[in-house]
Image (cartoon, coloured by chain):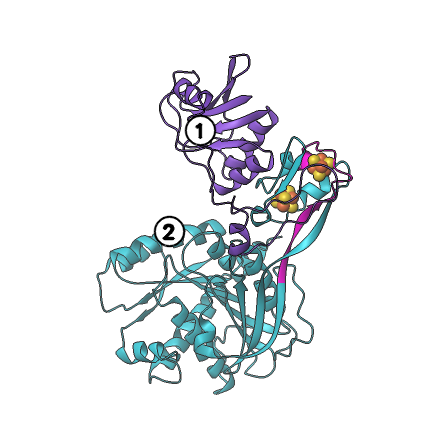
Amino acid sequence: MKVAVSAQGPDLDSPVDSRFGRAPYFVIVDLETGNHETLANPNVGAAQGAGIQTARLLGNRGVGAVLTGNIGPNPVSALRATGTEIHLGISGTVSQAVEAFRRGELEPCSGPTVEAHFGLGRGGGRGQGPREAGRGGRRGRRT
Amino acid sequence: MILSVASGKGGTGKTTVAVNLALALGRSSRGSGVPPSNDGSSPRNNGHPPRGSGLPLREHGQPPRGSGLPPGIVLVDADVEEPNCHLFLRPRWKGRETITLPVPEVDLERCDYCGRCADVCAYSAITVIRDVVLLFPELCHGCGGCSLLCPRGAVAERPRPLGSVRWGRAEGLSFYHGELDPGQALAPPVTRALKARALGARGADLVIVDAPPGTSCPAVEAVRGSDLCLLVTEPTPFGLSDLTLAVEMTAKLDVPTAVVINRADAGDDRVDRFCGERDLPVLARLPFDRRVAETYARGRPAVGAVPGWEERFRELGERALGLAAASRGRGEKRCRT
Ligand code: SF4
Ligand code: SF4
């Protein structure tokens, strides 16, 4: 599995950045091979939708888990829709975070405020239209 | 002719000015037969039903057919997030229209997850991650880019309701306001639709727009395209700092601007000095009047209730119309869209 950590710098020793969409770097560690690569986040200065764009970027790299500090509801929806694990409130260095993850010490984030709407399901079939769920409906989507 | 009334923040008396201005001008045009401005370019017509429409259609709206509203002065409450003019005017409502925005809907039978739609969307309202297409309708601005550029024709559009526009009559005025549906964040499309409907009203020759407070998108949308914007402020340091922001906004929009100082007797002269430095005409200095505050608290406008205020607002209106008429030639060129 590939794990992406939001980071203030490009290396394994860099501190974890508490922001998701506007973290300057993501260090992506492949747990099987032990290799890592660094992505400079192009969405740092995005006017809006930085979180969603970042989720897309990581998702398309095959990332299976995200370790970060805070994350907005829209990127949570995007990551959830692709089955990506989310771990919040992470601090320390990138390698410490990855180690903790490897040892199974991190609880996946369970109750995010899913405010966005899942538009369409995974592959095949005709997706439903996006839902104008009221607050109750949204809350019903919490897991 | 479009007069907008705005302020850098709430609570300056902007709604009071807009409502009373409309009432005072309405009364003078009906009552005395004296037009609010006797300038030759004035659209008024001695209180008779106006000829045609003296009003250019700035926006792409059509006159609401059969709206049931006689022409004349139109008051528009453009604070679609918190409309409140109707509380003072208590209009008889004549109609309502739902305002929608076209948002995409993806046919997954056709979609091949190429991601083009996600690339073109400036608002990240549609995204494609591997084999998942995700929509965030509340981020969508309805630009149509995704459906236009999808190579497989997989994106259809469906109308998403954002809010509504209502219209009615009150005290001889036509009245329009917009309401954003609860939970919706996208005010500008509703404001645009509202203005288009009001400007398109048959024979609307003076449209007074009560803009939302502040200088963000909804206020910009409300003020855009006016012949004159009246900025209502107070002679306090806070008033001055908000006025400064509001003046920047009208300058960017290239809308001629004048100032109304409310509660003019309580404060300092910094606002006056600022207006002097910037060549901003101060069209009225409204004193604090406890009777006005009391009628306001009872949900009644000052015009018609407190002696002296009809004249005050009529005078303000006449000055504003004169100034607006003078800068109108420039205004024609500002026409957007
Ligand atoms: S552009 Fe069309 S085909 Fe491509 S991912 Fe978007 S909806 Fe699917
Ligand atoms: S209509 Fe425009 S804003 Fe809405 S999803 Fe498509 S590209 Fe984005």
Foreground pick, B120 / B77: B120
Location of residue B286 (image quadrant): bottom left
> From the viewer's perspective, is B329 left or right of A129?
left
Q: Could you tell whether B268 is left or right of B154 in the image? A: left
Foreground pick, B242 / A69: A69
- Discs 2 and 1 carry the same chain letter: no
Q: Position of residue B129 (x, y in %)?
A: 63, 32
B27 lies left or right of B275: right
* Residue type at tag 1: Ala
- Can the viewer see residue B56? no
**Residue beneath disc 1:** A23
Residue B101 located within the stretch drawn in magenta = yes
Q: How crowded is mark 1: few (under 14 residues within 10 Å), some or many (20 or more)?
A: many
Hue of chain B? Answer: cyan
Residue A127: percent from the left, percent from the top?
Answer: 70, 45
Shown colour of chain A: purple
Q: Is mark 2 on a helix, strand or loop?
A: helix
Which quadrant of the picture is home to ligand 1? top right
Residue in the image at 42% along x and 26% along y: A105
Residue named by callout 2? B245
* Residue A122 in sight here: yes
Q: Which amino acid type is marked by label 2? A: Leu
Which range is magenta? Answer: B99-117
Q: Which chain does tag 1 point to?
A: A
User: Where is A50 relative to B106, above or below?
Assistant: above
Return the x and y of residue B87 as percentages of the image width and height.
44, 75
Q: Nearer the viewer, mark 2 or mark 1?
A: 1
Chain letter of the residue carrying label 2:
B
Does dot 1 land on a helix, a strand or a loop?
Answer: loop
Q: Which residue lies furthest to the front in this view?
A: A104
